[in-house]
Image (tube, rainbow, N blue to C red):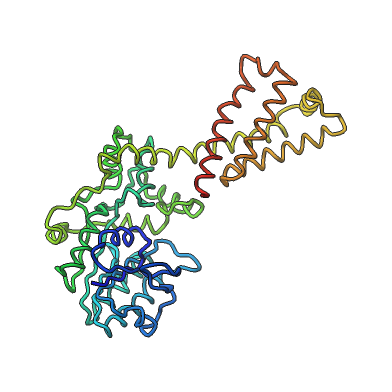
Amino acid sequence: MRILILGGTGLIGSALASQLSSHDVCTLSRSRAPNTIYGDFAQLRSAEVWLPLLDGVDVVVNAVGIFNESPSQTFSDLHVNAPIALFAACEQTSVRVIQVSALGAAPDAVTAYWRSKGQADAVLCASSLNWSIIRPSLIYAANGRSSRALCSIASLLLLADLQGCGDVQPVHLDDVIALLVRLIEAPVAQRQIINVVGPAAMPLSQWWQQLRQAMAMRPAVTIKVLPWMQQLASAMAKYLPSSLLSRDSLAMLRAGNCADVQPFAELLGRAPKAALPAADEAAAIRRTAQLGWMLPMLRIALALVWFLTAAVSLWGWPRDESYALLGEVGIPSSLQALMFYGSVAMDAAFGLACLLNIAWRWQLLLVLFYSVVIAIAMPQFLLHPFGPLLKNVPILALLLMFDQLSNTRQK
């Protein structure tokens, strides 16, 4: 059986491909590589351009999806236009279609994401094709980006209890893939929409507590977050890298994300498993989850050290005493003003660099240079009982850590 997986590099597509090794599996890609069909999904907006790509294909699985739009990736292109053109081509070739949609998708849904998925679903339902549509709830996957973010939130010292939000019913990726394999190999649900959900619906804060328990962490204290507080947080979310607090995310949480689990369980032939980390991966996931918020916190702390040092030097400490310290390390009076203002500017620049996660090695070298010069020229600071110079030792360790982590990400 020849199976074309669209979205083969995504969470669902890549996991599905790994479970279909006994079949002839290919993916659509903008790079020419083995077992790929060359093409740009967003640009395939007519049946005519799809037809050559479907030659010899028996089943196509459309797992393409984005949660946030960008100038090059829009809901209309990826969720509506390209899929509808694909369905039209499949009608001409009798290719079976499995559409990965989303729980809550509908043409009149509350978010553009849900509406775009629902529009394509409606066209597929009205077609003459042999189709199946799966609508997963929140998906837990150990290597999933959103799952890592949710685990990081769950590992916080305090958890939010979002007032006015509906329940969620998260599902494990393993169960999503098991269903897709069944639909491909033995079409048990033809021309059906399947809501793919976990075993139980619950408030999001309860799932976070379950994630903590699975990561071998004690229950956290929860604090009630009222709707107006949620609105304020969502308004600020556009300045943050995560989309978990966006307006659309909040709207979806308020709408709820639940369904009857029984039809899904019957297709699986068993009850779906809990959307939680396995016991053998709990320690690694807990460590990654905690670092997910600890590392940004440390970066902000280092940025504050630089910014406050610049502010204290500029406004909080007598200027003549600063010049006197420069004189003690051998800076001539003619250069002291230049060195002073240059140091203030450098401190502020390195504070910004911390927030941007760059220039860690330069910061490390500067702190090391300062420490050595002061220890030699003004040993009283090295031997001071408050340890003003010795406190640079943990700062150097943190800067080295961030430098090495930055190098690892770039490789």
In the orientation shown, which residue stands out farthest toward the right?
334
- Determine whether 282 is above or below 247 in the image: above
Q: Is residue 223 visible?
A: no
In this picture, residue 184 sits left or right of residue 375: left
| Observer-nearest of 285 and 318 | 285
- Determine whether 279 is above or below 175 in the image: above
Q: Where does the image place residue 203, in percent across and percent down from the top left?
A: 27, 47
- Determine whether 257 is above or below 387 in the image: below
Q: Where does the image place residue 275, in percent across and percent down from the top left?
A: 25, 48
| Observer-nearest of 321 and 233 | 321
In this picture, residue 261 sits left or right of residue 110: left
In this picture, residue 336 sits left or right of residue 253: right
Q: Where does the image place residue 332, in percent across and percent down from the top left?
A: 85, 29
Question: In the image, what residue occupies the spot 18% across and 67% down?
Answer: 185
| Observer-nearest of 325 and 184 | 184
Q: Where does the image place residue 66, in percent across and percent down from the top left?
A: 39, 63
| Rendered image quadrant of residue 4 | bottom left
Q: Is residue 141 visible?
A: yes
Question: In the image, what residue occupies the spot 60% across and 40% down?
Answer: 360
Question: In the image, what residue occupies the spot 35% across and 39% down?
Answer: 284
In this picture, residue 271 sits left or right of residue 377: left
| Rendered image quadrant of residue 266 | bottom left
- Determine whether 48 is above or below 18 in the image: below
